[in-house]
Structure formats: structure tokens, C-alpha cells
Image (cartoon, rainbow, N blue to C red):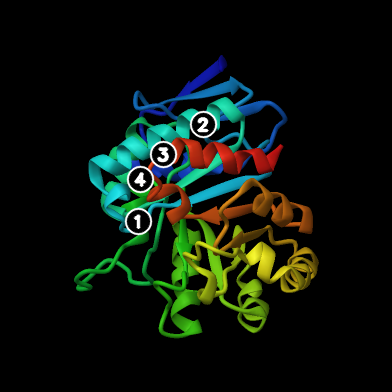
């Protein structure tokens, strides 16, 4: 990465800096990205790879969930592996981590770091909930919402959580379990929307790209109509699964156990990124 300029903002607190940072990061210029390192200087950089470069249209989400291998020190080590592969393969990889790990991981990683969930609550007496402002200030760039393992009670709560996340400055990936739910959620206009049938999550034998290709094709028509990028999830385990998903019109895939719990995570992620070539 070659720095070609910088700007210093002295008067903004950390929260406002993060808001400004995300605004700059949403600027899309070929080969150019905006960087905010710990010293507070925004760098205007010419690059071929960087966590915030808008030129990487295809994306690979890696959900660390609450696996032991995706928690604390192990999460840090795994993200370092993901970052190495992302740089080597020139593929945009987004680790999706627990809220408690966001600050430490985002402090060293050049990858976009997302959080697995935020709630709809605002500041106040809401014990145990996750405030969008908290993870945003810690360094999260985006959040999952409505994952099948952490669904909202009803659409109203999801809608409010999505609005809260968006207002704070977080990108969003909203999950739908079937076509009916996807048709409803698409009107939230999330950054990404995912089709992830619950019966295939964690599957070690078959992926959604193999079992539900006809439905995926229908999803692509819906998402294209509403101009919302589509992510395929559930059981993605190989470069072939990735190629099928991208070939159908998806912009990326979401994986978890295939990488996180693997004996050799680097080997698994290298196999998956081959599907982007």
C-alpha cells in the first residue's frame, strides 16, 4: 500500500471519528481507499488490497460463532491466518467475531471486522443486550442480524435493530431462512442479504449450493430486482460450492465450522478462496 495523502482530525471524539471513518470507507474509487490507523490520521492510499477497499466486490464471511477455536486468543490467531490468506489470495475475507473480541482484533487487523449480533435497544437499563454504539466504537464495521441461531422475536424487533445498526454506521447482513422470509426482509435494504436454510447449517455432507440451487436462482432474481447483494450460506465446504454460488449470481458466501473447527484452518480457507478465481 502506498500512502498518497493524509488528513488529521483533532477535534472529534472516538465515536465521531468512527462515524466519519465509515463515511469515507463507503467512497468507491478504483484503486483508492481511506485508512484510519491508531494515530488518528486518515490516509488516502493507493492499494491493491486493504480491508476497506471498495474494489473487492466478492466477499467471504467467516463466522467464528462461539466455538472455542473462535474465542479470545484462539480468535486472534485465526484472524491472523485469515488476514494472511486474504492478502495472499487478494480475496476480501470478513471475520465475524463475538462482541467481546471486537476491540482487540480490530486494533491489529487490516480486515473488516464484523460482529455476530446487535440488539435494538438504546442506552439504558437493558442488561445483557449488545448496543450497536458499543461494538461500533470498538471497531466493528458491520453486523449479522437474524441469523438462524439468534433470530429476533418478530419482524418489528429486527426492523428496529437494523435501523439502529444503520444509524450508528454499521453495515448489515440480514439472514433469511426461506424465500417467504427473504421477500419480507429485502425491504429493509440491508448491505447484504443471505439465504441460509437452517437444516443445512453445519452440514458436513451437502451444501446449500448443491441442495437448493433452484431456490438460489429464485433468490438472485429477487435480490437483483431490489439491488441488494446476495450471500449464500449453510454447508459451504469447497471451492466448487463457492463457484456454484458465485456462478448463480451471489456476491459471496458465509462459512463457519468448515474453517473455524478445522485441524488446519489455513488449508481450508485456501481451498475456499480458489472458488473466487
Q: Residue 102 got which mark?
A: none
Asked if one can make out residue 13 in the rendered structure from this viewpoint, the answer is: no
At x 33%, y 34%, the residue is 107
- Compared to residue 185, the image places residue 6 above or below, namely above
* 103 or 16: nearer the viewer: 103
Disc 3 secondary structure class:
loop
Q: Which residue is mark 3?
A: 264
Q: Are marks 2 and 4 in contact (CB under 8 Å)?
A: no
Q: CA distance from mark 2 to mark 3?
A: 13 Å
Q: CA distance from mark 1 to mark 3?
A: 35 Å
Left or right placement of residue 120 versus residue 30 in this view:
left
Q: Which tag, 2 or 4, sits closer to the chain's start?
A: 4
Residues marked 1 and 4 touching at CB (< 8 Å): yes
Return the residue found at the far front: 205
The answer to whether 248 appears left or right of 99 in the picture is: right
- CA gap, disc 3 to disc 4? 38 Å
Viewer-nearest of discs 2 and 4:
2
**Sooner in the amino-acid sequence: mark 3 or mark 4:** 4
- For label 1, the residue is 133
Q: Residue 51: where, in percent of width, then height? A: 52, 34
User: 193 or 218, which is in the foreground?
Assistant: 218
Residue that appears at 33% across and 71% down: 121
Q: Which residue is mark 4?
A: 15
**Residue 88 at what x, y percent from top left?**
56, 25
- Using the image, determine if residue 118 lies above or below residue 90: below
Task: Tell me the mark number nearer the camera, choosing from 3 and 4.
Answer: 3
Residue 144 pos. (x, y %) = 47, 61
Residue 214 drawn at (x, y percent): 77, 72
Q: Label 2: which residue?
A: 85
Q: For the point 39% across and 38% down, which residue is it?
A: 79
Check disc 3: other Cα within 10 Å, few if <14, some if 14-19, many if 20+: few
Q: Nearer the viewer, mark 1 or mark 3?
A: 3
Amino acid at each position: 500500500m502506498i500512502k498518497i495523502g493524509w488528513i488529521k482530525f483533532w477535534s472529534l471524539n472516538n465515536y465521531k471519528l468512527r462515524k466519519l471513518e465509515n463515511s469515507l470507507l463507503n467512497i468507491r474509487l478504483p484503486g483508492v481507499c481511506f485508512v484510519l490507523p491508531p494515530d488518528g490520521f486518515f490516509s488516502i492510499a493507493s492499494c491493491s488490497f486493504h480491508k476497506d477497499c471498495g474494489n473487492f466486490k466478492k466477499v467471504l464471511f467467516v463466522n467464528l460463532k462461539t466455538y472455542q477455536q473462535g474465542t479470545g486468543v484462539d480468535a486472534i490467531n485465526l484472524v491472523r491466518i485469515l488476514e494472511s490468506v486474504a492478502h495472499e489470495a487478494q480475496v476480501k475475507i470478513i471475520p465475524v467475531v463475538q462482541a467481546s473480541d471486537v476491540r482487540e482484533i480490530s486494533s491489529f487487523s487490516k480486515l473488516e471486522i464484523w460482529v455476530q449480533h446487535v440488539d435494538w435497544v438504546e442506552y439504558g437499563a437493558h442488561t445483557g443486550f449488545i448496543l450497536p454504539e458499543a461494538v461500533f466504537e470498538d471497531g466493528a464495521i458491520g453486523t449479522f442480524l437474524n441469523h438462524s441461531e439468534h433470530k429476533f422475536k418478530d419482524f418489528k424487533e429486527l426492523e428496529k435493530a437494523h435501523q439502529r445498526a444503520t444509524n450508528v454506521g454499521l453495515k448489515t447482513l440480514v439472514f433469511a431462512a426461506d424465500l417467504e422470509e427473504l421477500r419480507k426482509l429485502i425491504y429493509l435494504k440491508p448491505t447484504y442479504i443471505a439465504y441460509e436454510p437452517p437444516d443445512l447449517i453445519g452440514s458436513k455432507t451437502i451444501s446449500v449450493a448443491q441442495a437448493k440451487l433452484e431456490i438460489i436462482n429464485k433468490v438472485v432474481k429477487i435480490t437483483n430486482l431490489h439491488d441488494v447483494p446476495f450471500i449464500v450460506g449453510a454447508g459451504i465446504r469447497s471451492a466448487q460450492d463457492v463457484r456454484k454460488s458465485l456462478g448463480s449470481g451471489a456476491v459471496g458466501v458465509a462459512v463457519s465450522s468448515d474453517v473455524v473447527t478445522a485441524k488446519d484452518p489455513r488449508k481450508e480457507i485456501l481451498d475456499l478462496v480458489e472458488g473466487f478465481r
